[in-house]
Image (cartoon, rainbow, N blue to C red):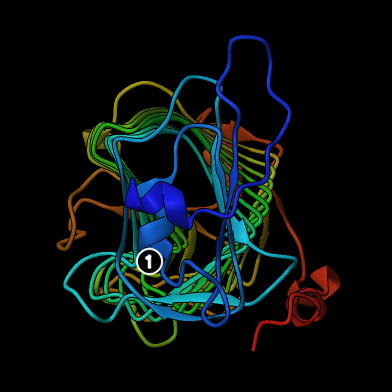
Amino acid sequence: MRHAMLLIMLFLSAGAGEARAKAIIVQKEGGVIHTIQEAVAAARPGDTILIGAGVYVENVLLENTGATGAWTTVRNMDGASVIIDGSRQDTAAFTIKNSKYIRVQGLEFRNARRYGIVGLDSEYITITDCLAYANQWEGFLCLNSSHCDILNSTGHDNVGDSFNYNNSRDSRMAGCVQYNGGNGLSVERGSKNIIVENNVFYRNWADGILVYIDCRNVLLKHNLIYDVHVKDRLDNGQGHGIKITHGNSNVTVEGNTFAQCRSAWVYEIANNGGDIIYKNNTLAAIAARMPQEPRKAWGEEVVFKGPGDYPGFKACRWYTVKEIEQHGWGSGNVQVDLKSLGLDEKIKGLNIP
């Protein structure tokens, strides 16, 4: 076969009865395989695709690939800067479709007309140490997929959400950094068993995290949500640290830090079922204003809870942290001075411009 003749093969150890895995080398210059798509088409379960430095103007499709326990890996070679520019076609820069046991590591996705990278109708996907930016829709998207983990990755300046789980389940997002986007993360449309922990969401114009439409068993834990653009966008139903809306259940908001948001969280009681629990969160410099109310003082600590639908707000009101506890909606939430958190130094340490 033509592809087989092009491969540079490095045989790796394999158990008895298993096919021997190989490494496929992609290089812009001087190699045999020059495009990521060609390497992906040649890959078999257990193979590793190693990509040399360069900008690859491609819309990569990895389809119908994978076998249980035999991870196919697509990664940069020796820490090289590998950029996949998806501007050529009206699709994602990198699509994983109808596949399983796929690992993507150390790649950048930019300028796609839709998503940076999407896992579609797939299972057991791990995306780690990747970067998605300047994409027209989401940066990272798991759609109709399961066990789709996004780890230690960064999304910024995407027009849509930087991270999104849509009708997906049994997945985890951890150690990621997001800034300059719409929603930092959306968990939506029937997603379940989703863990979001130890991430940073900074400087968004919509909401830090949105949990939306019939999601259940969602844990939002130990995240920092800082500087949602409350000063400029107070009347559009956005600017919240976390918004939980339209029929969700069993959502836990625990141990997060909210700073400079319109509210720490918004919860529309009339549209949610099951337990929504807020506990042990830290709030600093939360501003609040209802459209029909004068602006409250910057830094007054308030939390918003329904009932009522956006964008009217007519049946809604603001609740303080103390009132949240009195109503039995949460416990252990505290208010602190913004300066005491040292957040600007933390952001600077993350090299966020």
Asked whether residue 119 appears in the rendered view, the answer is: yes
Q: Is residue 289 left or right of residue 263?
A: left
Which is more toward the observer, 188 or 146?
Answer: 146
| Quadrant (top left/top right/bottom left/bottom right) for the N terminus | top left
Q: Is residue 172 left or right of residue 274?
A: right
List the single residue furthest toward the top. Answer: 17
Q: Residue at x 81, y 77 (%)?
A: 349
| Mark 1 neighbour class, 10 Å CA radius: few under 14, some 14 to 19, many 20 or more | many
Asked if 94 appears above or below 109 in the picture, the reply is above
Q: Residue at x 84, y 71 (%)?
A: 340
Q: Residue at x 38, y 52 (%)?
A: 3
Residue corresponding to mark 1: 116
* Residue 140 pos. (x, y %): 41, 58
Q: Quadrant of residue 18?
A: top right
Amino acid of disc 1? Gly
| Numbered circles on residues, count | 1
Label 1, secondary structure: give it: loop
* Residue 309 pos. (x, y %): 17, 51
* Residue 241 pos. (x, y %): 49, 60
Which is more toward the observer, 65 or 162?
Answer: 65
Which is more toward the observer, 255 or 300?
Answer: 255
| Quadrant (top left/top right/bottom left/bottom right) for the C terminus | bottom right
* Residue 44 pos. (x, y %): 44, 36
Q: Is residue 3 left or right of residue 69?
A: left
Q: Quadrant of residue 352?
A: bottom right
Asked whether residue 210 appears in the rendered view, the answer is: no
